[in-house]
Amino acid sequence: MTRKTGAIAALKKLETDREKLNQRQRELETKAATELGRVLLGTGVESFGAKHLKQIGLALGKMGEEQALEQLGISNHLATK
C-alpha cells in the first residue's frame, strides 16, 4: 500500500469512527435527558413552559451550582436531601 492510499484509508476510518462517536454522543444525550427528567419530575418545574425552563437552566448553568443555590436562598445542607 502506498503512502497516499494509506492516508485515504485512514481518512475513511476516521470518518467511520467519527460517525460512531456521534451516534454514541446522541445515545448518551438521550440517556442524560431521561435522567434529568426523572430528577425534575414532581418538583413543580414540569409546569414551566419549555422555553422558560431552558432559559432558567441556562442562567443556572452560567452561575454554577454554589452561586445558584446561594441566589435561590437554598443552603447546601437542604439541597443534599
Image (cartoon, helix red, strand yellow):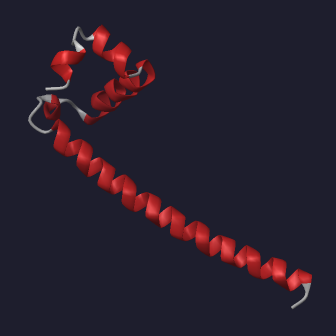
> Where is residue 73 shown, x and y percent of the image?
23, 8
Up-down: is 24 above or below 3? above
When asked about the image quadrant of residue 81, the answer is: top left
Give 45 or 18, whichever is nearer the viewer. Answer: 18
Up-down: is 51 above or below 23? above
Query: Residue at horizontal 25%, vertical 42%?
Result: 36
When asked about the image quadrant of residue 39, the answer is: top left
When asked about the image quadrant of residue 18, the answer is: bottom right
Give 46 or 68, whichever is nearer the viewer. Answer: 68
Up-down: is 49 above or below 62? below
Residue 66 relative to residue 38: left or right: right
From this viewpoint, which residue is outermost toward the left? 42
From this viewpoint, which residue is outermost toward the front? 77
Query: Residue at horizontal 89%, vertical 81%?
Result: 4
> Where is residue 76 shown, x and y percent of the image?
24, 17
Query: Residue at horizontal 42%, vertical 59%?
Result: 26
Residue 59 relative to residue 72: left or right: right
Up-down: is 20 above or below 69? below
Query: Residue at horizontal 30%, vertical 48%?
Result: 33
The image quadrant where one finds the N terminus is: bottom right
Residue 51 relative to residue 61: left or right: left
> Where is residue 56 shown, x and y percent of the image?
32, 24
